[in-house]
Structures are given as structure tokens and as C-alpha cells.
Image (cartoon, rainbow, N blue to C red):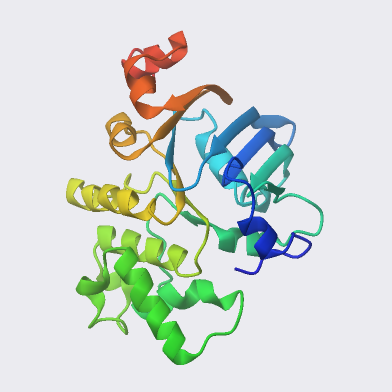
Amino acid sequence: MTPPPSQPEASRVEAAPATVPRLATDALTAWYGSSSGVRDVTLACRENTVTALIGPSGCGKSTLLRSLNRMHELAADTRVSGRVLLDGYDIYEPGINPIQVRRRIGMVFQRPTPFPTMSIGENVAAGLAVGRAVSRAERADIVEHALKRAALWDEVKDRLRESPLNLSGGQQQRLCIARTVAPEPEVILLDEPTASLDPAGAAHIEELVQQLKREFTVVIVTHNLQQAARVSDITAFFYLGELVEVGPTTRIFTTPLKPQTEAYITGRFG
């Protein structure tokens, strides 16, 4: 994939040492005016893993997530300090194109966000607008492959020209995932992707997350502790804008090291 302007050549990125995390933060602080949403966060997300961000409402999870692909800066009066590293290279370096960053670090939101004026097929192909030109035949292949990755192809293969609004909520969310994976990102960010879905739709997304990590690095924000325990390899607990504890999910949920983590996990607050 073509890197953002002023980034090292793709071959150098792909040749990065195995010890370099796919995505990492280094003393990252995200600001809203003079107030910080998250403070001094250092976190590493390795290739082909799922990292869950948990914590009570307002603790900074979604702010951190939006900072990982430069969506935080789209809000008024915002900024970040510290670094966000994709394959070891800072995405906030001067001259880096944020649109190219978001192509490489895709994001799916809490509520399904299909483009209502586009068909199902056009929604999937929308992410291909940035980058190299593709032929009609190649575009069709990419759309099919993306929908298969999102476990949606069999349900919509004969409906590609229909409106996405004809789909169920769970199908719309999988469509948004297909749209995100179509440009071949390295990282997928999921911001409470099942919060607006019924249990059946949520189960589909959880199964899909396990499939996606075979090809991508996944970071998921969730308020559902059971979901975090089911889908993630690493769990990071946030409280009042700070990263309190991070570690393998099994350990975090069975033998947390910090009293705040234990109190949250056991339901004493949050």
C-alpha cells in the first residue's frame, strides 16, 4: 500500500523488525481546548491481535481511539502531544496526509453509518476513492472480497444495487466493516461496534472480530466486559483519562494488578 507523503517507502515499512508493534502510542495526550481527554498513554498493539479498551464512560477510551487515526483533530479546538506510531513511524509528523492515515487505519463507529445515497456495492467501494485507480472488474472483485471478509456476501450478493437502508442494523454494521477493509488497512478501530445491535447482531460482529485479526490488527472500545473477555487478546483499562493497567486479557480479568482495575472488573464501580 502506498504510504502517506513523506513517510518511508512501503518496502521499509514492511521490513520493520518484528519487535516493532503494528500500532503504538508514546506518551500520547489528546486535548480539547485546555482539558485533556486522555493523558500520557503509552500502549502497544501488535500485529494480528485484538486489543480491548475498557473503562467507565468518560474515561477517554473513544478519545484515544479517534487519536489513533487522526480523527480527533476533526473536532474544534483539539490537538495531541506525544506520538502515534504505525509500524514505527509517527502519523503526526509534519507533511503526513491524514486522509492516507485513515486509509491505513480504518474505523467503524458505534452506530452503523452506511452512505444512504449510495447502493450497497457503492458503499463498499467508497473507500477506494483515495489511492490508485482501479478498473471496474477489479473494483467488483474488491467489493466481493470485502463483503466475504465481513461475512455479508451471501446475504447481499444479489442486492448490490439496493439501498443499504434496506439492511438490518447488524447487516449495516457488517457493511461498514466491509467498507473499512476494502482499501486493505493495516489496523481496524472499532468504537463500541455492537452497542446499537440486538444480541444476534452483536454475536455476528464478535465472530467477525476473531476472523479479522487473522489479517489485521484490531483495537476495540467496549463497555461490555464479557465481550472484551471473549474477543480480545490484550485488555487496557482506563480511568479518568489515564491508562491504569494493560496486559493479557485472561490475567486482567482473573488477577488484575491494580485495585482500580479489580474494582471495575468486579462491578464495584463504573
Residue shown at 32%/33% (left/top)?
A: 224
Would residue 124 be found to the left or right of residue 104 on screen? left
Give percent across and percent down for residue 187.
51, 53
Say which of 97 and 232 sits in front: 232
Residue shown at 49%/55% (left/top)?
A: 107
Question: Does residue 256 lie above or below 235 as drawn?
Answer: above
Give percent across and percent down for residue 9.
72, 64
Question: Does residue 203 lie above or below 35 as drawn?
Answer: below
Instruction: Quarter of the image for the N terminus: give it.
Output: bottom right
Residue shown at 34%/59% (left/top)?
A: 173
Q: Quadrant of residue 253?
A: top left
Give percent across and percent down for residue 71.
61, 52
Q: Quadrant of residue 132?
A: bottom right
Residue shown at 43%/71% (left/top)?
A: 115
Q: Which residue, as the protein is rendered here, is positioned at the far right? A: 94
Say which of 231 and 62 sits in front: 231
Give percent across and percent down for residue 110.
40, 49
Residue 99 shows up from this direction: no
Would residue 64 be found to the left or right of residue 201 on screen? right
Instruction: Quarter of the image for the C terminus: give it.
Output: top left
Q: Which residue, as the protein is rendered here, is positioned at the far left? A: 200
